[in-house]
Image (cartoon, coloured by chain):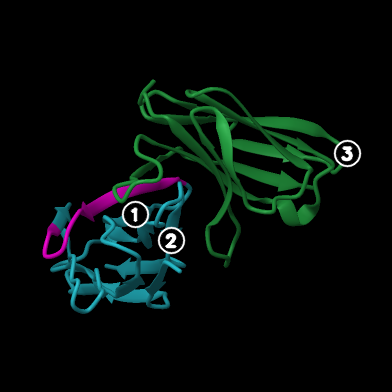
Amino acid sequence: GDSVTQMEGPVTLSEEAFLTINCTYTATGYPSLFWYVQYPGEGLQLLLKATKADDKGSNKGFEATYRKETTSFHLEKGSVQVSDSAVYFCALPSYNTDKLIFGTGTRLQVFP
Amino acid sequence: ETGVTQTPRHLVMGMTNKKSLKCEQHLGHNAMYWYKQSAKKPLELMFVYNFKEQTENNSVPSRFSPECPNSSHLFLHLHTLQPEDSALYLCASSQDPGTMGNEQFFGPGTRLTVL
C-alpha cells in the first residue's frame, strides 16, 4: 500500500545552517506530494507541494523536488532561522481513497 | 472567519462528562476529517465525511461520535472518555477527496485533557 517514510528527529541545527529532511514514498500512480509544518501549539499548515514528477515546490525559502526515479521528496532550506523550529510532515494522497498518508513527522530545533 | 476554525481550543473534562468539539470550514470544500494527534505517536485519521456522508471510520471507539450536518460543519461528540484519549484533535477539509491532488487544510486543533 501507499506509505511515507521520514527521517527520525529531532534535527538540531544552529541558525543559518543548511537543512535537509529526507522523505521517501511508495505510491500507486503519481499523486501530488506535500510538506506540512506544525508550529508549537498550532495545527498543520501546508508548506509546499508538487503535483508531478520533476516539479519543485517552494515556499518561505524551503524547497522540495518530486523525484520519481528515487521516489523521494526531500525538504531543504539553505539557511534556517530560529522561527523555523517546528515539526515537518511529508504526505501524499492515498490511491482511490479520501485519505492523506502522513509520515511520522520530523522535529526541527534551531538554536541561535 | 477564514479557513478552518475549531472550538473550543482547549477542553478539560472528566471521564463521566459529555462534551462536543466543533469544526467549521469557510472554504467551500466537500470533505471534512477528524484526526487525533497524541504525543510521540503518528497522526491518526479518525473519520472522513464526503458530501456529508461518512466514508471512513478508522476503528474509532464508540465513545467518539461524529456528526456532519452539512459540508461546512463537523462535530465530534465525546462521552465517557478515558485519560488516554487526551490529545490534540485536528479537523481538516479538502476540495478534492479521492483524487491524486487531495490537499487538506487544517484547523488549529482542540487540546483535550481527560481527568
Q: Which residues are magenta?
A: A42-56
CB-based contact (under 8 Å), mark 1 and mark 3 = no
Q: Name the spot of residue A70 as percent of width and height, x first.
A: 22, 79
Residue B103 in view (yes/no): yes
Disc 3: which residue:
B16
> Magenta span has A55?
yes
* Residue A36 image label: 1
Q: Colour of chain A?
A: cyan
Disc 2: which residue:
A102
CB-based contact (under 8 Å), mark 2 and mark 3 = no
Q: Quadrant of the N terminus of chain B?
A: top left
Disc 3, SS: loop
Q: Which chain is green?
A: B
Chain bearing tag 2 is: A
CB-based contact (under 8 Å), mark 1 and mark 2 = yes
Q: Residues within 10 Å of mark 2 (few under 14, many from 20)?
A: many
Badge 2 amino acid: Phe
Give the number of the mark in front: 2 or 3. Answer: 2
- A17 or A32: nearer the viewer: A32
Q: Name the spot of residue A57 as percent of width and height, x first.
A: 16, 56
Badge 3 amino acid: Thr
